[in-house]
């Protein structure tokens, strides 16, 4: 079984993001400190200049929120608040207090962002390149699917994408076409079984039918090619859906390996394939 | 409260706002003769604080009642795991257990519904037909949208949520 990676090997060591995370409290508290120092020394200047630190820190925080796959609307909207903050004229004392409170708020939001909204997106999580356990699975099965025709591989991509989009009737029709076209020796039988399984599931989904008592599945000799080998302890319901996950992943791997022109479409659906890989 | 065939529900927040402003108005009119002379328009304005949320709730609920049969006919029954970014705009039907309920008091409830394959956030922009609680088993019909319209993970914009089995 291709296990989900404990640590994503594709994730670049992005030291810039670490520096930006440090910059949020440094800039916001630095601005407040700047104001306090000048205030104590009796220097005359426009106190709103020191607010620039909070404004820049807000933009940095919003950027850090933006690059995460899971978005934090509160952190994203902080630049708006920083403009309101800078636009309102206040006296020196109020301005300093406001800056300190704002700096504390930004720091709390940064901590919240880090612990509740995950790590910044990688090229793989943003769908720009293949990554994680899906990439490992495709590399593992590459040799098995390298011999299939580009037409069959293209049909595999079409079926996967249509299924991901929820166009189950199209997925069933394309699977049927692949099963008819694929009746030649080079087509590869695990792939044809995958088309058959997806045709069955797509028809059930399209017509909103209940799960059947008997259903198509992969035989034992296909297990080395499957991302999620069936577990004997699973009930029928789980086995039925595991067969579908495996069939979809077989199609993804086959189309990625043998149909390069379809890779942009497959990358667009990578999140769905990753979900299939990582789910039970 | 029922208007026509539509059961209208006023949120506790709207009632609280009405009560607070009623107290303010009473206090102000007792302490200031100037305010008493303005009561002719202040009292209707006060009632607008109740009437506007009632009207909005009536309109949204009657709209939802109209579109619910269309969604029921078109929605495909899917497992939660199958819902992904490529399905944005598709009508879907899911069945699962309610794991969390938020913002019910605002008449804009958000549920976290889970089945054996995963969990998904279900947002409703009006009050549901029946009160749904944690651990209720429900059928959700709605459209897949992104959490923040243009970005964020897929969630269900709920048109109908109903209990299919009492917890």
Image: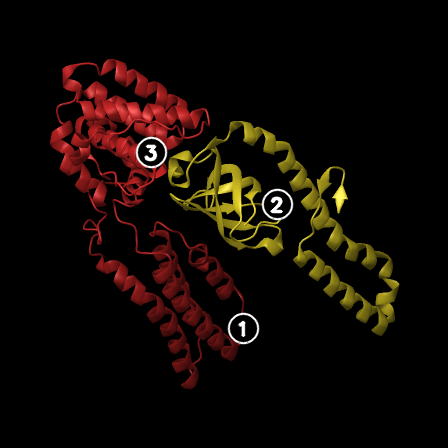
The residue shown at (22%, 45%) is A132
> Closer to the camera: disc 3 or disc 1?
3
Are callouts 2 and 1 both on one chain? no
Q: Is residue A230 left or right of residue B73?
A: left
- In percent of width and height, residue A109 lies at 41, 64
- In percent of width and height, residue B52 lies at 72, 49
**Color scheme of the displayed model:** by chain
The hue in which chain A appears in the rendered picture of the protein: red
Q: Marks 2 and 1, how far apart in space?
A: 46 Å
Q: Mark 1 points at which residue?
A: A90
Q: Name the residue under label 2.
A: B128
Question: Nearest the camera: A228 or A237?
Answer: A237
Using the rendered image of the protein, determine whether residue A131 is visible from the camera's viewpoint.
no
Determine whether the residue tagged by mark 3 lies in a helix, strand or loop. Answer: helix
Q: Name the residue under label 3.
A: A240
Are callouts 3 and 2 both on one chain? no
């Amino acid at each position: 079984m291709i296990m989900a990676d404990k640590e994503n090997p594709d994730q670049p060591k992005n030291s810039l993001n670490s520096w930006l995370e440090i910059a949020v409290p440094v800039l916001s508290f630095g601005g407040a400190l700047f104001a306090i120092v000048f205030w104590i020394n009796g220097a005359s200047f426009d106190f709103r200049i020191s607010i620039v630190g909070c404004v820049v820190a807000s933009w940095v925080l919003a950027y850090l929120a933006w690059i995460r796959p899971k978005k934090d609307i509160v952190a994203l909207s902080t630049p708006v608040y920083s403009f309101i903050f800078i636009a309102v004229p206040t006296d020196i004392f109020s301005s300093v207090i406001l800056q300190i409170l704002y700096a504390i708020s930004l720091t709390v939001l940064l901590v919240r962002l880090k612990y509740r909204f995950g790590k910044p997106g990688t090229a793989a999580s943003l769908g720009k390149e293949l990554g994680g356990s899906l990439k490992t699975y495709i590399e593992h099965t590459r040799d098995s699917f390298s011999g299939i025709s580009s037409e069959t591989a293209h049909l595999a991509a079409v079926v996967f994408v249509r299924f991901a989009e929820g166009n189950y009737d199209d997925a069933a029709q394309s699977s049927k076409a692949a099963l008819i076209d694929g009746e030649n020796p080079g087509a590869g039988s695990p792939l044809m079984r995958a088309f058959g399984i997806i045709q069955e599931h797509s028809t059930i989904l399209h017509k909103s039918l209940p799960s059947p008592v008997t259903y198509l599945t992969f035989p034992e000799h296909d297990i080395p090619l499957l991302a999620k080998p069936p577990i004997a302890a699973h009930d029928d319901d789980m086995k039925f859906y595991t067969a579908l996950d495996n069939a979809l992943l077989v199609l993804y791997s086959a189309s990625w390996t043998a149909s390069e022109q379809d890779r942009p479409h497959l990358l667009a659906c990578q999140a769905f394939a990753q979900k299939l890989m990582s789910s039970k | 409260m029922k208007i026509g065939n539509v059961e209208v529900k006023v949120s506790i927040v709207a009632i609280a706002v009405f009560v607070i402003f009623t107290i303010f108005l009473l206090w102000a009119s007792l302490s200031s003769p100037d305010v008493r002379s303005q009561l002719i328009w202040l009292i209707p304005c006060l009632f607008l604080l109740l009437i506007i949320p009632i009207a909005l709730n009536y309109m949204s609920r009657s709209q939802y009642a109209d579109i619910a049969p269309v969604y029921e006919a078109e929605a495909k029954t899917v497992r939660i795991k199958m819902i992904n970014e490529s399905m944005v705009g598709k009508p879907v039907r899911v069945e699962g257990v309610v794991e969390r309920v938020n913002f019910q008091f605002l008449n804009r409830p958000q549920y976290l519904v889970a089945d054996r394959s995963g969990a998904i956030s279900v947002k409703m922009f009006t009050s549901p037909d029946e009160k749904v609680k944690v651990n209720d088993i429900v059928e959700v019909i709605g459209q897949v949208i992104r959490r923040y319209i243009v970005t964020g993970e897929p969630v269900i914009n709920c048109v109908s949520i109903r209990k299919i089995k009492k917890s």
